[in-house]
Image (cartoon, grey):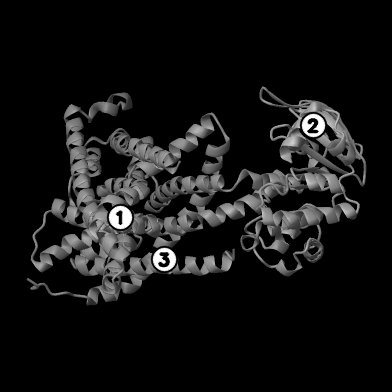
Amino acid sequence: MFDYNFHWRPVMKNLPDLLEASLLTLQVSVLAMILGIIIGLCLALTRLHLKGPLYWFASAWVELARNTPALFQLFFFGFGLGAFGLHLSPYFIVLMGLTFNCAGYLAENFRGGFQAVPETQLRASRSLGMTAWQAYTRVVIPQVFRIVYHPITNQMVWAVLMSSLGMLVGFRELSGETQFFASRTFRIFEYFAVTAVIYYVIVKIILGASRLLAARLFRY
Amino acid sequence: MEPTVSFFSGFNVNDLWFLGEAALRTLWISMLSISIGTVLGVVCGWILYEGKLAATLTLAPFLDIFRSVPLIIQLVLFYNFAPIVGLNLDPFASGVVILSIYTAALVANVARGGIEAVGAPMRRAARSLGMTYWQDLRYVVFPIGGRAVFPAWVGVALGVMKDSALVSVLGYVELLKASQILITRTQEPFLILSIAGAFYFALSYPISRYSASLERRWAQ
Amino acid sequence: MIEIRDLHKYFGALHVLKGIDLDVQNGEVLSVIGASGSGKSTLLYCINGLEPIQQGSVIVDDTDVHAKGTDINKLRTKLGMVFQQWNSFPHLTALENVALAPKIVKGKSKAEARDIAAKQLIHVGLGEKLDVYPSALSGGQQQRLAIARALAMEPEYMLFDEATSALDPELVGEVLDTMRLLAEEGMTMICVTHEMGFARDVSDRVAFFHQGVMEEIGPPGQIFGDAQSEHTRKFLANVR
């Protein structure tokens, strides 16, 4: 026991590369979240207000995203689409997989948020002469945003953690880069330990920033 | 090569058996990990609720790590760490250990929420009837709090079932790994991924729907 | 002036307003009383176009509320409405609650809108609460906030839909006082209410609704002292 010698020096030498890769992790996660919020909002509104094919499309998206493994979704955008001659770069595989997943989960959060704002708020706004658009953007959506703020924060954390699956489809974000160096030097444990710490710090930064922002945004 | 002929050529009935066996392995490792993790998690949740300083200072941050580092990194780390301390664990055992702790970290929060959901007045009422602390826990807190957080627990359990796909990185041939192997051989990514996806979906979707309907019924 | 002619309203198969004819003159205070489900709240929703109608017409100052070409949002700025549930916007302070519509509907500048809002909040007695969020206000204060919010649009008519029904008894008085103040200032008001004291003391006329029909209308003295309809007498005997 413990006749293993830890070698941290190679990891420390590659630390700048790992940190740079973690910027890529952040980039793809943030991008997926932005797209996911926009699409998720559309999916939620579709499921709340429309019937017919659009409703079924939105429902299929949401249920597939929530009821299959994220890795499966990534594989699907990876070699599943290959069956149709569509070969995406690893970056786009991860971006599309994360977006698909986040949009599905966020759609459900948005739907709950819309349902939690009483119908009477819309009525009161309309009685003041606001258009439907004004009533939604100035009165309803700000309240929905407050309700879904914490779920969005959690989803952002999930997006970062999920992006680590990129290493299984050849994407050199933080995990992929770690695997690359680890397999070259065989210091697998050391490399992944440092990477785990980096992930931990990223998650804590996101949560901290979210808390600071919430304190500024929500005074009520 | 004729595309119409090649479409199903590589995939045969034996492969379906291969996938079926892999699906059973997914089920087995999930059920085992969820069971162990739930028991561990409930105990952890109770300890956190009781809030003895030492426990909170050590246990809470420890569990937090498992929620802040990607599962795939946890798996790789543990699998490579075990031999260092003289444990020779196969991929399955390593997977069960990490998935169980991961489950426990998530369940701990759920369980603590459940205990908090049982208000102090109700517990005082129970104690005033002469119940001991343990009787109160067994006959009041467990059934009432359990019901309050049952849907959340189902969410965690289904999440772990889907995340069990990640054990494939250690070489354990569960459903998604089996699909990958078959895809490499048969070059039928779309068909095989659809079968794998359908399996996860068929397991997850009815359970999550049932849990949501229970939640609605109990909310009334 | 509000002119209602042969107004019919259905919710599906349910016939909730069965041919209402009613004129409300400028400066008049009309109270509408009647049992729950008699259609009196629906009447208010039809007047400012929050509910579509199936037959008849509602004319506000020569504008047909339910005609196709009517700019309903512009018309609604004339018709202030206060609801049973006060519906304050929880994400805005009292001042922002009141200033929002003048700003985005009437296009007032930010400073102008805030001035109007402050003035109306002082008007209803909430001058101390300008920067408070609704969650920190009592039900009665939130209802006065709702009145100020409607007044900020400088409406010519005010529609009150059971404005005090959802309030705790001890908070009813402050809201009624505010409504009384508006009446004294000459505001044209239609008040759907269960407060018989208010109806008797403040209104110029009282209308009694029964099962979708306006059974009786007249000065408070007539309705409360010498009702012609059997239904009116029965209703009044029960609420006292």
Total marks in image: 3
- Please state the chain letter of the residue tagged with numbered disc 1 in the rendered image: B
Cα distance in 3D space between marks 3 and 2? 76 Å
Up the image or down, A131 lies above or below A14; here it is above
Q: Position of residue A187 (x, y in %)?
A: 19, 68
The residue to which callout 2 is attached is: C232
The residue to which callout 3 is attached is: A23
Of all residues, the one furthest to the top in this rendering is: C13
Amino acid type at image mark 3: Leu
Q: Residue drawn at (23%, 74%), measured in percent from left and top?
A: A10
Cα distance in 3D space between marks 3 and 1? 59 Å
Left/right of residue B85 with respect to residue A82 in the rendered view: left
Q: Position of residue B166 (x, y in %)?
A: 26, 51
- Give residue A69's quadrant in the image: top left
Assess disc 1: are there few (<14), some (14-19) or many (≥20) residues with their C-alpha within 10 Å of its C-alpha.
few
Q: Residue drawn at (20%, 31%), measured in percent from left and top?
A: B16
Q: From the viewer's perspective, is the residue at label 3 or at label 1 nearer?
A: 1
Up the image or down, A204 lies above or below A165; here it is below
Observer-nearest of C145 and B4:
C145
Q: Position of residue B134 (x, y in %)?
A: 23, 58
